[in-house]
Image (spheres, rainbow, N blue to C red):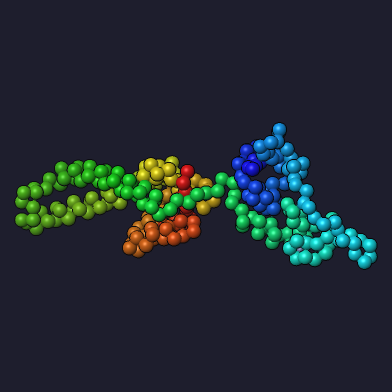
Amino acid sequence: MDWYYGDAGRQIGPIDEASFDALVGAGVIRDDTLVWRPGLGSWQKYQTVRPVPSLPPPLIAADGSAVRFCSECGKPYPPDDLAAFGTSLVCAACKPAFTQKMREGLQPAGAMRYAGFWIRFVAVIVDGVALYIVGLIFFAIAMIFFRIDWANVGRSQADLMQLLALEGVLVLCNVIVSAAYETWMLGRFGATAGKMACSLLVVKSDGSKISYQRALGRHFAKYLSSFTLAIGYIMAGIDEEKRSLHDRICDTRVIKK
Ligand SMILES: [Zn+2]
């Protein structure tokens, strides 16, 4: 059965039992955290719904004192010295490592879903088509501006220089337009048109929005991904967080909305 809990005035959930236990273990859900699950009339403090761990009664040591055992190191302690996490009792010495372990095994609420290679590939194609159309418009404008006599092109050295100059201008336009396009879209919306069409977002590793500067840096880092025979892109297919080379360089992630 799924749980909900309140965190700083927000409602988080539904989360499954295992994740809920992990959140308790990690100290995210504490005794005074408000929780709810189907069947409960209202939000309750966790301490009132916390399952009572079914533990053996404390052993009585030779000196007559009661002892319980740390579920991590197994050493005996007075019961009050052990902290309860779900059904585990943990000593002060083991607590940091224990909570760390719980955190690592935890899928945080609202966890990011990383977008894989193929969906990103589709998004890149969509953007590529959009930029290609823009490129054609620039080409048309440049043709008019350069007044190339296509019927006699290549007949003279001067024509050739004109063509090279045209090519240079178009390449430069392409670099500027694609950088401006991606920087603006990612900085403003977190996604290019292609990524929007595929419901993808580019975020920082902590899930927050990326700045215009980072978007610009990421754009040029993509050149590296291309220059490596696209291996930089393919890396997204094998990385556990689906990072491409440019995502690694810029500490970004592509996620599904
Ligand atoms: Zn211990």
Which residue sits at x=52%, y=49%? 112
41 versus 216 height, above or below: above
93 versus 167 height, above or below: below
Which residue sits at x=5%, y=56%? 155
Q: Residue furthest right?
A: 63
- Residue 156 at x, y = what percent? 6, 56
Indicate the quadrant where residue 35 lies. top right
Which residue sits at x=20%, y=46%? 139
Question: Residue 6 or 60: which is nearer the viewer?
Answer: 60
Question: Residue 97 or 142: which is nearer the viewer?
Answer: 97
Report whether 242 appears left or right of 106.
left
Indicate the quadrant where residue 37 lies. top right
- Residue 257 at x, y = what percent? 47, 43
Question: Residue 162 or 126: which is nearer the viewer?
Answer: 126
Question: Residue 191 or 164: which is nearer the viewer?
Answer: 191
Picture mark count: 0
**Can the viewer see residue 174 in this picture?**
yes
- Residue 22 at x, y = what percent? 66, 52
- Residue 98 at x, y = what percent? 70, 59
Which residue sits at x=64%, y=43%? 1
Report whether 46 appears left or right of 2.
right
**Can the viewer see residue 145 in this picture?**
no
